[in-house]
Image (cartoon, rainbow, N blue to C red):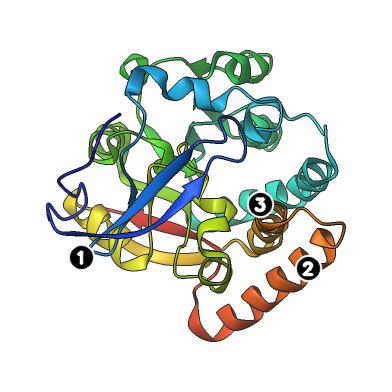
Amino acid sequence: MISITTCRVCGGNQFTTLFTCKDYTVSQKLFSLIQCNQCSVIITSPRPEDETLGEYYQSEDYISHTSKANNLINLLYLNVRKITLKQKHEMLESITNQKTILDYGCGTGSLISYLQTKGWQVKGYEPDANARKIAQTTCKVYDKPQSINESFDVITLWHVLEHTTEPNETLSLLSKLLKPKGKLVIAVPNHKSYDADFYKQYWAAYDVPRHLWHFNRKAMERLLQLHGFVIQKIEPMKFDAYYVSLLSEANKNNSFLKFLKGFIRGFRSNLKAQKTGEYSSLIYIASR
């Protein structure tokens, strides 16, 4: 196991232990969350060694790697994804007139496949072999970051940065791959949201140990500044509040009322976020 002693966002070395979360998806093991006293990023520590992290993704319930509707929650996810693909396309069209894109951590390639039908020149990167095999049926997908040998107008990371073992190395690489006036789009869960505060250790978006870093606005702004990026706009991912709350209810008690309770909690989270801006997940649009 690897224990984090230095914050990757601010370099601080003073942490507060928050609570322990369970890996409900694969191992059923417990993992601790610590929070940097300086920048407020939350970190999964200790975490598995890099060589064994892949074992924690081996589940048919891990939807971004399989795209199988093997339970009701995943079925809902796949149906909502049809709507969110359209929303992502519209958002990307609104921030750039250029159409070369790298989807970093593209999973099964649903987004780049969709964008390709809309006239975009698309590439993906995906480390998981099973997901990559599906994505490669329609698009060019790299298996290693070091193999990417071209530049892009837009680079997107949809719920990916929190999975990276070294976010600074990832952002440093992407900075080099982005064209001078390019846009970096990063979507991550927001631990300052109402649903995160309500569910605490049961909050599904902590998703230990697959999620290694847990961001809020303050931490994301500071991390991006380290690499010369300025946040231009922050957008909400409103559907995430419902999906995460449904999973969180299942983590908490898995009763037959989880769908009703999860929907109500997701609705309340979005309602409160209308005033605070602290949605369950946030999209950061940045440039240099």
The reply to whether discs 1 and 2 touch (Cβ–Cβ < 8 Å) is no
* Disc 3 residue type (three-letter): Asn
* Disc 2 residue type (three-letter): Lys
Q: Residue at x 38, y 42 (%)?
A: 212
Q: Indicate the position of residue 17 as horizontal and vertical percent values.
A: 30, 58
The circle on residue 37 is 1
Q: Indicate the position of residue 109 as horizontal and vertical percent values.
A: 63, 28
Q: Residue at x 22, y 42 (%)?
A: 4
Query: Does residue 127 appear in the picture of this structure?
Result: no
Quarter where residue 175 is shown: top left
In the image, 73: left or right of 39? right
* Disc 1 residue type (three-letter): Asn
- Between disc 1 and disc 2, whose residue precedes? 1
Q: Residue at x 35, y 29 (%)?
A: 151
Within 10 Å of disc 2 (Cα), the crowding (few <14, some 14-19, many 20+) is some
Q: For the N terminus, which image quadrant?
A: top left
Within 10 Å of disc 3 (Cα), the crowding (few <14, some 14-19, many 20+) is many
The circle on residue 251 is 3
Label 2 sits on residue: 261
Q: Indicate the position of residue 34 as horizontal and vertical percent values.
A: 30, 54
What separation in Å lies between label 1 and label 2 (alpha carbons)?
33 Å
Q: Secondary structure at mark 1?
A: loop
What separation in Å lies between label 3 and label 1 (alpha carbons)?
28 Å
